[in-house]
Structures are given as C-alpha cells and as structure tokens.
Amino acid sequence: GGAAPKQAKKVDYVTVNDYGSSIFGRLQSLFKKAIEDAFPGLDVPLLLAETPNPQFGDYQCNSAMPIAAILKATGINKKPGDVGKEIHAKLPENIDFVEKIAVMPAGFINVFLNADYLRKQISSLALNGISLPKVAKKRVLVDFSSPNIAKEMHVGHLRSTIIGDSICRLFEAVGYDVLRVNHIGDWGTQFGMLIAHLYDRFPDFLKKLPDISDLQAFYKESKKRFDEDEQFKKRAYECVVKLQSRDGEIVQAWNTICDVSKKYNQIVYDHLDIKIKDVGESFYQDKMVELVKWIKENKPDMLRKEEGRQIMFPTGCDVPLTVVKSDGGFTYDTSDLAALKYRMLEEKCDWNIYVVDAGQNLHLETVYAAGRDFGWYDENTQRVEHVGFGLVLGDDKKKFKTRSGETVRLLDLLSEGVKRATEKLKEKGRDAVMTEEELAAARDAVAFGCVKYADLSHTRTQDYIFSFDRMLDDRGNTAVYLLYAYARIRSIVRTSGVTDSQLADYLAKTPILPLNHPAELKLAKQLLKLSDCVLLVLDSLMLHQMCDYVYNLATLFHDFYNECYVIERKEGEPVVVHFHRLALCEVTANVISTCFKILGIREVPKM
Ligand code: ARG
C-alpha cells in the first residue's frame, strides 16, 4: 500500500526552437494552430499519427471526430468531414514539405509528403552531415547507477547505469548542460561494522590498499560478527561516532573501503564507456545536519515525534519520511531530502532525474512531495522526476541470480558476454578475415553493446529477461544485427572505389538527389524521422523508441539494397556507380552512427 501524489503540472520541458527536419514536429504545431484558429477555445488533444496505409498519405490528423462530438454535446451539429475541411482551411496554403492534403468524408485529414522536399533534405544531410532539432538549453541532473558501497553492484544498478547513461547521451546530443551524478550509498551505520572488521582483518590497511576481492563476503563476515558478538558491536558503534566526528584514522578506514568498492565499479564503467561523477550520500553529511536545523526553523509544524523518531508526512502522502532516527542518526530519507534541496537550490537544475528501479517510486515521490511542501522548486518551471524501470529476470522468469542463488557479479556477467561474443564471431568465420585488433574491437562492441542494447530495447517500465542467447541473435532487434548492418553499409562505400572527395564533388554539384525508386523514397523518409525520434524520446525518456527507430531503419536499408543497385558490375561492361545511392548509404550509416552514440553502442567499421 501507500501512495504519494505526483508532480501535478507537467512542465513543457522540451522547448523546440527549430524543428530541423522533424516533419512530425512541424505538422504538430501547424495542426495545433489550425485547430485553435478554426475552433477557438476548444480543449481537445491533437491526434496526429503516421498513416498505416501509404495509399492515404504519410500522416493523418484524426482530431475532426472528437471535435465533432464535442460540438454536438453543445448543440452544434457538424459532420466530422466538415470539421476536417474547416481545419484544413486554416492550414497555410503552401507548406514546403506537403504535396497535398486530402480530407476524407469520415473526417480524417491525410497529409502526403512532397518528394522533392525529401530529396532536398536528404541532399542536405549528405552534404552537411546529420543535424538534430534545436531545443532550448536546460540544466539537467541525472542521478543514475548509484550502487551501494560494500554491497556489490547488481543487475538493477546495471540497468540504471545503462539507461541513465543513454539519457545523458541524448541530452548531450541536443546541447543540454548535463550533470551525471552517482548517488552512491557510501554513508550510514553499516560503515561502523565494516571499519571495525577492517581493523581486524587488514591491520596494515593504512599502508596499502587491502586486497578484498570479494567485498560482499567481507560485508557478510562483518555483519555476522555484528549480530553475534556484543564486544564487536560496541566497537562498531564507536567507529560510527568517530566517523561522524571526522576522526582522521577512521575516515581513512572508511575511505579505504570506499576505494576498494569504487575500484571494482570503475572497471565496469570503463567496459561500458560510462562517465559519471561521485556525489554520494556522504557528501550530504553536513547538509543533513543543516537540513534538520532548517526544517525546525522554517517549517517546524511539518516534523512530528513518534517513538523517539522525527518523522514527516508530506502533503497527500500516507507513508512518512524518517528525518531523524531515535538514536539521532539520519536515514536514506534524510540524505535524499538534503540531495533534493541541494540540487534544486544550489545546483539550480531545471530538470532533476532519478534513474532508479520502480520499487523505489513511493520513497522518491514522497521525497519530491516534501520538496514541494518546502518550496524548494517551482513546479511551473522546474521538473523533478523518477525515471523508473522494471526488474531484470533470469530465464526462469525469477529475479536474476546465479545458480546457487547469489547476486550475479557484474564483472563475471560482462566476461561471460565477451566469451560468448568471441564464440559468435568465430562461428561466423570473422577471425579468418580480420586482424587481431579489429577482432578485439568487434568482440567488445558486440559483448558490451548487446548487453546495453538488450536493456534499452525493452520497454523501460517493464521487467525484462536477461538472455545472452537472445541478445546475441543476429537476426532480431539486437545490437549484433545492427552492428553488422552498420559495418556492411560502411563497407559498401569503402569498396565502391569512390573516394570521399569524389562523392563530395558530386554532392556539391547535385542540390537535389534523384531519388525516385519507391525503396529509395521509403528509406529517405525513415532517415528524416531521426529528428522526430529524438524529440519523441526527449519527451518520453523511453529509449526503446530509438531502438525501434534504428532497427526499422536497418530493415528499410536492407530492402533498398535488395531492390536497388548501388554499384552495377556487368560482364564486359564498365562499372556503373549510382552516386545518389552511395550518398543514401552514407546518410544511413551516419544516422545509425548518431543513434549508436546516443544508445552508447561502440561502432566498428568492420565486423
Ligand atoms: N543506492 C540506492 C540503491 O542501491 C539507489 C540510489 C538512487 N538515488 C537516490 N537519490 N535515491 O538502492
């Protein structure tokens, strides 16, 4: 049970200044305005979608039907077809990307794209490179990964790491100011027992970093002693007190334990190309003291004493936050309150995102509700948001564990991926045609790419089944398939015999590429949709939408390549190079590469 209210008003946090090639974005704003002009003050959501059947154009606006229904309820009888015509009449006469607009009797407004517009846009992408829509700059903090020291990073943290990093990459791609924050659990009473245990097990820890290969086991050992040995327990408490009062040697012991853990995590981050800055719970120690003082001075009514604890119920919440424990210590709640205050008031974020498993939703929403009660952020301009995700499951659909029921060590998991990727490449005979370096690059791209892509391509909010077999399948929506597709496209250009400067010369002389074959035009449309996709994901933070996009792109490229010769080699005849198709290959590869960058997939030119 338990509930907390969500941030009420959704801030329009993505402000588009220039839609670039996003046709969908431009259509949206055109239709919004036309509907507003034709039926002022009518509060209807815009229904705009891609048309399922190309016979009816490329996009369709389906707002006429609900509008007719609303009008009817107020006593005005208008057929949806007429409503559609009135909306159509308010659209600008000439829209550069529109060939024609047809209003169906049932009210559907069908939009057909102008092929010359497509040709021009693709030519510009070929000549000038990929450009993304321009959005207003935002300062965004992304709290992700955030493992706990001494309790090993597990697959849940891996999910947070992968999703969080990709969200950061997307934000960076559109020019946001991004703070990548690792809110590690590096503070709390458990450090007392860890430090006491460290003194016993590694008495010379001050001189050299102890070789604790299994921090998890170390944690368990110390926990066992803590539970069974009164003497040890007492020492552990003394260590906590000393740690909090910044006793030099105890702080060093604490640092040692953190370093051991961070060193391990860093290997995982290096494999996965993750950049992140530690701003853990310990960072808030003084700020938590300040916070409690601040609440007592400014909002004393919010605090309530219960069995020695100081708790608070934010507005609309029925599970309280524990601000101070009965022994005077702080909790996870306290550090998150202090972190929220700091992020909104000191870091001055426009957007504060927490990439944390869905199980922590209640905790986070309760903290956010407290932040609103305290007036730490303005809901009309700032946004605080939990970006949740489901569980990682094993093949048996139960929580992902080792056979013996232990937490899976992430480094073991990644090594397994590397092993499987090596087998996969051998199976395809790639070891025979690539140099050792190329093979190693391909192996790592496959191993780490497949783990990341499997995670990102599943709907974030749902649980997903971790399966190497599935993620290494080269026929489905997987990183392997895409990496192959990408390498193949690059090799078409590489082996065409056409040099970069020859292609550049051609493009400079050809402002409109002669794209006429249906497969060329289909591919061209999909290429232009990159901008739509970026805007969509910027709003939803659902990265599987980008995976779907790039997968569809690769499939459409495949169709195009099957139907259209890029290079024609006929016996006894000179080789014919279709330059405009070569340009289409280049643009496709560049768009895939842009998606890879956002998804955090390492591209390799050869596979
Ligand atoms: N350390 C926490 C855990 O492992 C996640 C922290 C998420 N971030 C936050 N600000 N609460 O469960």
Image (tube, rainbow, N blue to C red):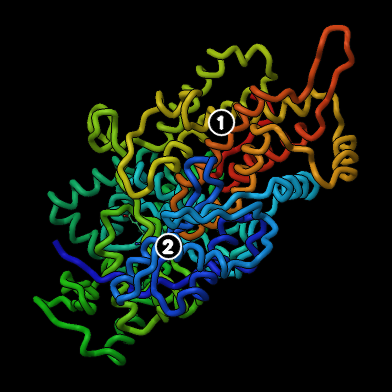
Image-quarter location of ligand 1: bottom left
Residue lying furthest bottom in this view? 297
| Amino acid under disc 2 | Ala
**Residue at horizontal 51 percent and vertical 56 percent from the top:** 103
* Depth check, front residue: 319 or 525: 525
Instruction: Tell which of 539 and 264 is nearer to you.
Output: 539
Q: Residue at x 36, y 41 (%)?
A: 155
Q: Is residue 536 left or right of residue 19?
A: left
Q: Earlier in the sequence, mark 1 or mark 2?
A: 2
Helix, strand or loop at mark 2: helix
Rendered location of residue 391, percent (x, y): 30, 44
Q: Residue furthest left?
A: 307
Percent from the top left, x then y, of residue 218? 30, 43
- In which quadrant will I find the N terminus? bottom left
Q: Which residue is mark 2?
A: 64
Between 210 and 549, the residue placed more toward the observer is: 549
